[in-house]
Image (spheres, helix red, strand yellow):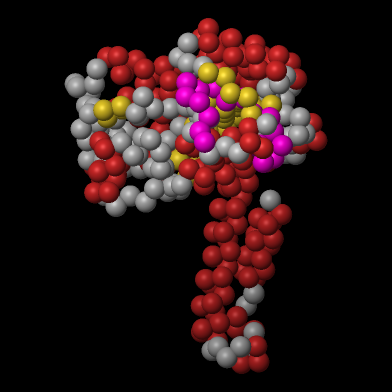
Amino acid sequence: MLRCLLLTASSIVLRIVDPENLPAGEIVSLSKNQLATLIWYLKWGLSLWAVVDLNSALNRWAANRWVWKIDKSVWNFQTEVAVVTGGSAGIGACVVKKLVSHGIKVAVLDVGPLSESFTQAERDSIRYYKCDITSRDEIRGAAEAIRSDLGSPSILINNAGIGNAGTILDIPLENLKKMFDINLLSHWSTVQEFLPDMLAKRKGHIMSVASLASFVALAGAADYSCTKAALLAFHEALTQEVKHRYKCPQIMTSIVHPNWTKSAITAHPAIEAGLKRIGARLLEAEDVAEAMVKQIISVESGQIVLGPAISPKIRALPLWLQEILRDSQANVVTGNGSTS
């Protein structure tokens, strides 16, 4: 905000400067007309920059429950406990590693064992719980074990997700149900299990991992796109309920929208070939994890868009522009298959 005020003050100063009264030759080797043009660009450029900066500041303020200064003193990451679904491999494993590097104890919920990428020192701060997150009973059992072993978690990162490839007519119903169970419904189960602990402590951070598919639906991946768009609605509703129903603005809520990232999903033949065809540049899992953990450590709520900044604004564009963007992605997902 201070930077925004400085920019605004600078633009005001430039607006009242009269280039006709400036000794151009004594300051720089510019003519009166050249100096007048320079000042015109500077004052309008600084004004625009100030508006953009102010908008960013207001967005952060709104995302953090209209709280101007967050009390971060209640967070001691050496004693915090985080739960990460799908944390055994891929992006989830990178997130776990980075959380551990900050001294946070991590409980991993996954059906597969921890990958070999974890060092012994990292494993000392990690507890693995074999858990099918589509089962409410297994989540409840894992939660009870976590509280007994590590204490009540203050951080929940719903990272687990799968991808399918198949048209609306072709996708088997079993695959469709599994997609919604893992990518969407599991968020209800984990939040219902761990949010009460956070409310009791009046401290917490819940993060959902969505996708740029939250904003642009993909042909051949209607189910995936639906779950990610629904996660955005889930995040917004959760934010409102924490703030207005439970009167606990101290609990942070974040949602992450990564672009195509190197993972089991993008390595699937039905998707990999399409990405190569459009020349897509894939994000590294480590970079996505870095952005996610940075958000946790900063103790801030909000949306993280790891891709074109225009992505969240696509729905506000004219329909013909939206359709051009969707057309450009129409052949990324081809064939049939699943990463589950």
**Left of 260 or right of it: where is 129?**
right
Q: Position of residue 68 (x, y in %)?
A: 72, 39
Front-most of 160 and 189?
160
Q: Is residue 153 visible?
A: yes
With respect to residue 141, does 227 lie above or below? Answer: below
Q: Position of residue 251 (x, y in %)?
A: 67, 26
- Which residue appears at 58% of the width and 68% of the height? 43
Closest to the observer: 209 or 272? 272
Visible residue check, residue 326 = no
Which of the two residues, 241 or 333, is positioned nearer the viewer here? 333
The residue at the far right in this view is 73
Q: Residue furthest top?
A: 137
How many numbered dots are placed on residues in this image? 0
Query: Measuring 34% from the left and 15% from the top, which residue is drawn there?
Result: 177
Please check the rendered image and state whether residue 7 is part of the magenta-colored stretch, yes or no: no
**Which residue is painted at 74% across and 16% down in the image?**
200
Q: Which residues are magenta?
A: 99-116
Instruction: Answer above or below: position of 338 versus 18.
Output: above
Q: Nearer the viewer, residue 176 or 106?
A: 106
Residue found 59% across the figure and 9% down from its top: 141
| 43, above or below 76, in the image | below
Task: Measuring from the top left, give residue 182's x and y in whole percent.
Answer: 43, 20
Q: Position of residue 278 (x, y in %)?
A: 26, 49
> Can you say which quadrant of the picture contains the C terminus?
top left
**78 with respect to 307 (left or right):** right
